[in-house]
Amino acid sequence: MMKPLIAVVTGGSRGLGLGIAKGLRSEGHHVIILGRNEEKGRHAADKIGARFMFVDLLDLQSVHNVIERLKSECERIALLVNNAGICYEQWNKTILRDSVMVNSISPRVLMD
């Protein structure tokens, strides 16, 4: 049996992210779900025995805040699953900015 790892999953409160978080928990790993909907995030985390931490990937200060919290509360994070993402059929400047933040910039900052 592998030693339990600490895994962080963005967008882990539903869909594919929740499935990934659930799978990691079923293998005995410690999972932290990151998300911006506290109610759904806490419910999902409680349901699978994980932890939830708030982050708004549209806000770099929020990303930096969760990074500091993770550093202070976790000895070593072994796995980061950047699952959160947004995609729209129609585009404008705001949607483009939001997409770049959530899909590219915030995941890169989390990886550092």
Image (spheres, rainbow, N blue to C red):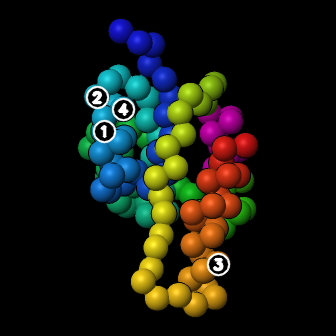
- Which of the two marks, 3 or 1, is nearer to us in this view? 3
* Mark 2, other Cα within 10 Å: few <14 / some 14–19 / many ≥20: few
Q: Are marks 4 and 3 in contact (CB under 8 Å)?
A: no
For disc 3, the marked residue is: 97
Q: Quadrant of the C terminus?
A: top right
Q: Disc 1 designates what residue? A: 22
Tag shown at residue 26: 2
Location of the N terminus (image quadrant): top left
Give the Cα distance between marks 2 and 1: 6 Å
Tag 4 residue: 24
Q: Earlier in the sequence, mark 3 or mark 2?
A: 2
Rendered location of residue 88, percent (x, y): 45, 80
Kindly identify the amino acid type of the residue bearing the numbered disc 4: Leu
Q: Which region shows up in magenta?
A: 66-73
Q: Amino acid at mark 3?
A: Arg
Q: Quadrant of residue 100?
A: bottom right
The label nearer to you, 3 versus 2, is 3
Magenta span: predominant SS is helix
Type of amino acid under label 1: Lys
Which marked residue is nearer to the observer: mark 4 or mark 3? 3
Q: Secondary structure at mark 1?
A: helix
The amino acid pointed to by label 2 is: Ser
Determine the CA span between mark 3 and mark 2.
36 Å
| Cβ atoms at labels 4 and 1 below 8 Å apart | yes
- 75 or 92, which lies in front? 92
Residues at marks 2 and 4 touching, judged by CB atoms closer than 8 Å: yes
Whether pointer 2 and pointer 1 mark residues with C-beta atoms closer than 8 Å, the reply is: yes
Rendered residue at 63%/88% (across/down):
93
Q: Is residue 73 positioned above or below 13 on the image?
A: above
Q: Can you see residue 29? A: yes
Write the residue at 53% across / 55% down. 54
Return the mark for residue 72.
none
